[in-house]
Image: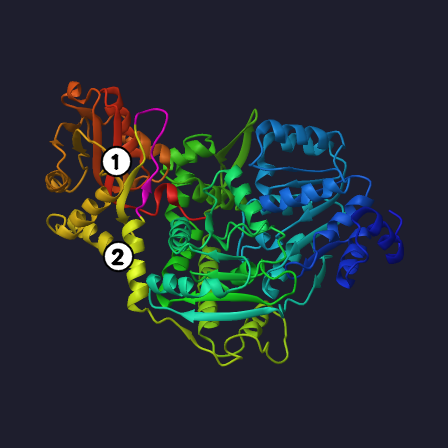
Amino acid sequence: MEMITRQQSESTLKQIFRLPSFYDRQWEVISQVMAGNRVLFVEKTGYGKSLCFQFPATQFPGMTVVFSPLLALMRDQVSRLQSLGILAACINSEQTEEENHDVIEKAGNNEIKILYIAPERMENYEWMQTTHSLKLSMIVIDEAHCISVWGHDFRPAYRRIINLVNLLPGNFPVLATTATATLEVQKDIAAQMGGQTVEIRGNLLRENFSLRVVHVKSDDEKLAWIGMHIDALEGTGLIYTGTIVETMNFSKWLQHLNISSVNYSSRLQPDARRNVEAGLFNNQWKCVVSTNALGMGIDKPDIRFIIHTQMPQSPIHYYQEIGRAGRDGRPTDIILLYNPADRDLPEAFINGSKPPIEMYGKVVDSLKQGRLGEKQIMETTNMKQTPVRVILADLTDQGIINEVFEGSKRKYESRYGAPAFDASGFTRLRAHKFDELNKMIRYAETDGCRMKYLTGYLGDSVSGTCRNCDNDLGIRHRVTLTAQWQSKITSFWENNLPVLEVANRYSNLANGVAAAYYGNSNVGAAIHKCKYQRGGNFPDFLLKMIVKAFNKALKEEHFDLLVFVSPTESGNLVEEFAGRLSREIKVPLSCRLLKSRPTQPQKVFQPAVLKRSNIKGAFEYADPDELAGKSILLFDDICDSGATIKEIGRLLTQCGAAKITPLVIAKTVGGDLDND
């Protein structure tokens, strides 16, 4: 297209976007894109990277496709573009198949100017069929650090985008943007995009941030610090936790202290997520407690503080997450509650980021038996969806398996004469990630300028210090857990019972409660010792806990029978404890729930479908007539996915039970409560 000057472009900018002018770096990027170049733009959050593709998109004759993993960004930007009269739409998993179909149809008819699409949707058969007829003018790769295996959030689906980019003519405009890339990752992204990529890097310094690290020795000290200080923090903020369970616990703690808060995670339904996001924009709460699922793509300029209760995996993870605050340039508090023992969780994430080598062999062996789809592979290998997808992407990349279609169904097959799987890169990547974690620990423990540490890690050279972080100000933050705050915390834990969300339309099963989370060190240790190390009967303190939980949550209900779950392992351990519980709460004990066939321990299965299959039809009740119209208290020692309780609930309902309420000693933080 004919090049236009900055003056001409800014006149158009005022007409379409109602903005007075470009930043210098914005115009530098836009002019390169409009000249037909491939550009990688690394710039801090809140700078206006989106305009660098939105403006050219309005000037190009065809459609611009924006690949982004951020559903909130899609919603916000599509809404804003439509309000400006720009034909914009998105394709993602939050929309129905009918809605996505309509968007694809409009795209095929050239009725859309800017189309946002999640990278994973490229694998959709209908989309793949439509791409051949699209009139494309530009490709945009948002969150481009996901391209690089060395980046902090690598996604296999981004490989398909790179494959597409490499098929395009050299003069076809491609823009990749990210706020978080080390120089190493930047070079890797540019190399994958092609040798002629123009690299533009902004200044990543955030001068308005007040970076602090608070040294703590326990989770209770984290609760205490937040309780003591959050009211003194200005405005609305975010508290980031490491797991979904922790989002609920910290949010309930704040509510216990009469501080307005709400929890957020990928486990919420789309409508609930949108409601929380809207409430955050409207400052409905003092804070939102979330996993890192919240914040990406949300353009709220006045988030005044961010607190991390869990150490992130690397400084680049941390920089990205804190970058969601203070976009208006006003003073912003950034706080890390640091316990050296917290490295266990990021280490677990690192160890789980690539499946063990033997899992690759399982997938290859399963495909030697014939073509299989993703779900079939999960079932035959006893593996969850995420590791299966990673493995399939790696095996496809190395030419060991082929991706094929049977009609619209994607399947995989073993490739004849394929090379042996090369795992050498995994070893290097794992070592790299542990090195990144150690750098995060050094950030927490440094006595130097924290902002200088972060920007130096990212590849920026900053002279002097920020004069705004705790180290520059000579402040050391620690927690003194007074008797008053310990009493508040003890009261909170006694009243914060884990809910077992098992109610469903297939039975008369009601939601129940657990006395504690299995992750509670003394609870989990005691159960494990008794079940798996021949440690004898469950100790009395567990009985006191579960009686207290019963009295707190269920004492007002009437129960006709206490039925216990027959264990796969551990002999009469559950029955003996159920007998003691029955005497304490004065509910008659039934020993008539029996195994009708052998089962394996549920913990050996990964996919939910295999957990359900393991216990489907595996129980019977010796005297079903005695259950007619009765209210049943169903006891078990541990609840993980809830599959066993749901299966027994279905059986007891068939036997005539009017209501079945589960009560367990401990709820795991796995199963349906996986972290993001």
State left or right for residue 35 relative to residue 640: right
Where is residue 116 shown, x and y percent of the image? 66, 41
Note whether 484 is above or below 81 in the view shown.
Answer: below
Q: Main secondary structure of the magenta part?
A: loop
Q: Quadrant of residue 184?
A: bottom right
Residue type beneath disc 1: Pro
Label annotation for residue 603: none
Q: Which mark is residue 662?
A: 1
Q: Is residue 470 magenta?
A: no
Residue 576, image x, y percentages = 10, 41
Q: Amino acid at mark 2?
A: Ser
Q: Which residues are magenta?
A: 497-508
Q: Say if residue 436 shows up in the picture.
A: no
Above or below, 62 against 428 in this view is above
Residue at the extreme top: 625
Q: Residue at x 58, y 60 (%)?
A: 325
Q: Give the secondary structure at mark 2.
A: helix
Q: Quadrant of residue 617?
A: top left
Q: How many marks?
A: 2
Q: Marks 1 and 2, how far apart in space? A: 23 Å
Mark 1 or 2, closer to the camera: 1
In x, y percent, where is residue 136?
75, 39
Q: Which residue is mark 2?
A: 521
